[in-house]
Image (cartoon, rainbow, N blue to C red):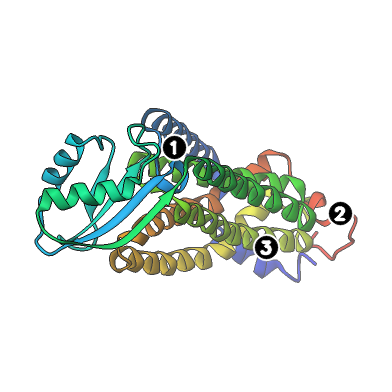
Amino acid sequence: MLEQNGSKDINYRKNIVQFMHWKTIAFSISAFLLMLALIIISVRGFYWGLDFTGGAVIEVFLQKPDNLDHIRSRLKEVGFTKIQIQNFGSSHDFIIHIPLQEKHPNTDSGGQILKSIQDIVQEKIIVKRIECVGPRVGSELLIIGGVALLSALIAIFLYIAIRFEWRLALGTVLALTHDIIITIGALSLFQIEIDFTIIASLLSVIGYSLNDKIVVSDRIRENCRKISTTTFSSSYIINLSITQTVQRTIITSIITLMMVFILFVFGGAMLRGFSLTMFIGIIVGTISSIYTSSALALQLGMQRDHLIGNRKDQVIE
């Protein structure tokens, strides 16, 4: 069998990229980024949206644009010290985030803020949107969001363990966790508001990154059934599998990043956090698909026999 496939094997040896040769450097970079992300999260924390903290969000339109600092300072003077106000699309549109105010726990915060803004700008304002979330609902939503992410990782582990092998499943889940931690570290660094659109974006990152990892895992199993590790090492099979899929991975990532970039530029303020999270997550997920998940499975001792079991396949010997 080896003689019949000799030319093919020579071609593989010439064109194969030695990805696993650099796995130590890749692990070191990943460990550094993980530590950096955890440090940033511990120091800066997160900018939680009203979905989780409770409070109110008000979107208003002013016929005459006013200075943001002026509105902020005047609202602080009347007791709203923790408000966050920013332009929303144009200099006439403002969006105001109001956390729960201990000073007015039983009053209509939205109504009071609108009255305060009316007094500040001395003109009629147009209210486009008012949303209020209670603190109990916010804490419940935070728990639900965390459970959703954890449930996704557990389901992925079980799926890959059943379809492939537990070492490959554990390597994939650890790689996905690596992707999520680095991504939320970037969210903490840039103080991007975390709401349910961000949770949806993180779940999308998991799904996108998982797709790449499943493709690589499937090719590894296919090559394990064709190639004997008595002649070729497990590292060779993984290098071959990643080499065969890396072009598809990179092209898919570039096209997706282009779409996400267009969404970031033209999607408006509401989708900016979502698209930025996706952009960061896709880049990190693409790199981990190439270097992290398969390399971790190899470090855990994954062998050809683990993937094919007792199946007697025709192999190159």
Q: Quadrant of the N terminus?
A: bottom right
Q: Which quadrant of the figure has residue 106?
A: top left
Residue 305 in picture, x, y percent from top left: 82, 51
**Label 2 residue SS:** loop
Determine the residue positioned at 89% across, 61% down: 312
Residue 238 in picture, x, y percent from top left: 64, 53
Residue 92 in picture, x, y percent from top left: 16, 62
Judge the density around disc 2: few (<14), some (14-19), many (≥20) Cα neighbours within 10 Å: few
Determine the residue positioned at 57% across, 44% down: 146
Residue for badge 3:
219
- The mark closer to the camera, 1 or 2, is 1
Judge the density around disc 3: few (<14), some (14-19), many (≥20) Cα neighbours within 10 Å: some
Q: Which numbered tag is attached to residue 33? A: 1
Residue for badge 2:
309
Q: Earlier in the sequence, mark 2 or mark 3?
A: 3
Q: Which of the pair 65/293 is nearer the observer?
A: 65
Kind of residue sitting beneath label 2: Gly
Q: Which numbered tag is attached to residue 235? A: none
How many marks on residues?
Answer: 3
The span from disc 3 to disc 1 (Cα, nearest Å) is 28 Å
Q: Is residue 77 left or right of residue 310?
A: left
Kind of residue sitting beneath label 1: Leu
Q: Is residue 317 left or right of residue 7?
A: right
